[in-house]
Amino acid sequence: MVESNAIFEIRNFSIHYGDFAAVRNVTVDIEASKITAIIGPSGCGKSTLLRALNRMNDLIVSSWVEGETLFRGVNIYQRDADVIELRKRVGMVFQKPNPFPNSVYENVAYGPKLRGIKKKSQLDGIVENALVRADLWKEVKDKLNESGMSLSGGQMQRLCIARSLAQEPEVLLFDEPTSALDPISTANIENLLQELQKTVTIIIVTHNMQQAARISKYTAFMYLGELVEFGDTDTIFVNPRNKLTEEYITGRFG
Amino acid sequence: MAIFDNELIALKERVLKLGLMVETAIRNSVKALVERDSELAKEVIKNDHLVNALDVSIDEECVRLIALRQPMARDLRLITTAMKITTDLERMGDLAVNIAERALELNEEPQLKAFVNIPLMAEAAQSMVKDALDAFVAGCSRLPYEVIKKDDEVDELTVRNFEELLALMIQDPKIIPLAIKRTYIAKYLERIADHATNIAEMIIYMCKGKMIRHTDITEEP
């Protein structure tokens, strides 16, 4: 199904927290320039799997992995892997909008500055471009020096997306990006993701199954750390093959 | 989710009720013809609005369930199936009315000959409707495939009926107006069986998630 154009190839991949296997033996390909949704009940390991894709789990001391995760053919857990570079190429946006307590401009310029870009005109260009791509430019272009925290929830989330985009990532990981937002802001973000997938591969963890159905091309259903079913979103929501998937998406779980 | 489960059971029951009304209409329309009972024919015509009203209200309920419950997977297939098969049932009700109308006309005329093929067709068509609805309620089984097979029987009877009437018309052209009405009635029954076949195909979709309409699939895989 996705062999041809896989940006991530996850192979017999397990993630442990100490003795606890949070993700067990997952094998799946993630297709480039598409939206893949990961769904499943709380504690199923979906966020853990997502965070493993740019090694955010490294921050949890007890965590360790087995198997392989290849990003563009290279194992991101190999000994000499450059984690900083990985996180630049694979960005992340979280559930709660978390702009830095700084101006709109500085939020977006932060990453490029860290990378050593100092020239004002170049930074201006990066900031504008990222805000345009995050569909926020029109709303903030006259308040670039105001605090990022002064924006609405939906705007803050798009600011966080712009901050990630300023790093020119190849993949963006979203962990419940709209669960703290109202329906209109949610629709804005969903439209934005549809647009962004043309240039950035998107993997989104969501509890909102309608959201997965609305925006994703592929859906993965996880349960108790295992990947139960992966397939075209159309198939998963109309005619899933696995009984557990069926029970979960029809709300008759457990 | 218990509320939703109850709503789905209620939806099935209403589709079943519609099916029973339509089965009754078919049976009575043919009885009105064979037993020359014009009162019964009028009753079939008079009751059709009840079929129409229930069809509309089932559709409305389906739309409501889609909007409010956002059904997925087998629930979604059940609701879309209910919407489609009620349309077929409503059309069958209209065809029973057509039979009743022809019965009213024929009952005013001398009997051409005893009815043989038409009662057989009516019986086959009715059992197709019944089996298709049983399958809708009981779930997945061989039943919808049996229904699809039975359609061939009805088609054969339609041809036989036409050939017999054609022979009579050639012998005695004066009977042509009456004979043509009989061929109409056979055609109505043949259409009823086609609608029952549509229902059976939708039941298979509901069970398997596969559309077999306009394919050659007639056997359970």
Image (spheres, rainbow, N blue to C red):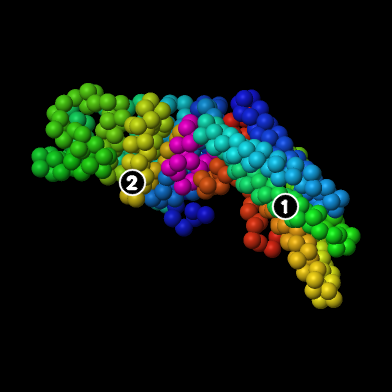
Q: Read off the magenta span.
A: A207-229
From this view, report whether residue B13 is shown above or below residue A195. above
Q: Residue at x 31, y 30 (%)?
A: A154
Expressed as whole percent of the image width and height from the top left, the position of residue A40 reads 53, 33
Q: Residue at x 62, y 34 (%)?
A: A247
Q: How many marks?
A: 2
Q: Three-letter amino acid code at disc 2?
A: Glu
> The N terminus of chain B lies in which quarter of the figure?
top right
Q: Are marks 1 and 2 on the same chain?
A: no
Task: Return the residue at label 1.
Answer: B101
Q: Report the disc number at residue A195.
A: 2
Expressed as whole percent of the image width and height from the top left, the position of residue A240 reads 60, 44
- Which of the pair B91/A126 is nearer the observer? B91
- Which of the pair B66/A246 is nearer the observer? B66
> Is A208 part of what is drawn in magenta?
yes
> The C terminus of chain B lies in which quarter of the figure?
bottom right
- Which of the pair A167/B72 is nearer the observer? B72
From this view, report whether residue B215 is shown above or below residue A85. below
Instruction: Check contact, mark 1 vs mark 2: CB within 8 A.
Output: no
Q: Residue at x 37, y 45 (%)?
A: A194
Observer able to see residue A243: no
Which chain contains the residue that carries disc 2? A
Which chain contains the residue that carries disc 1? B
State which quadrant residue B164 falls in: bottom right
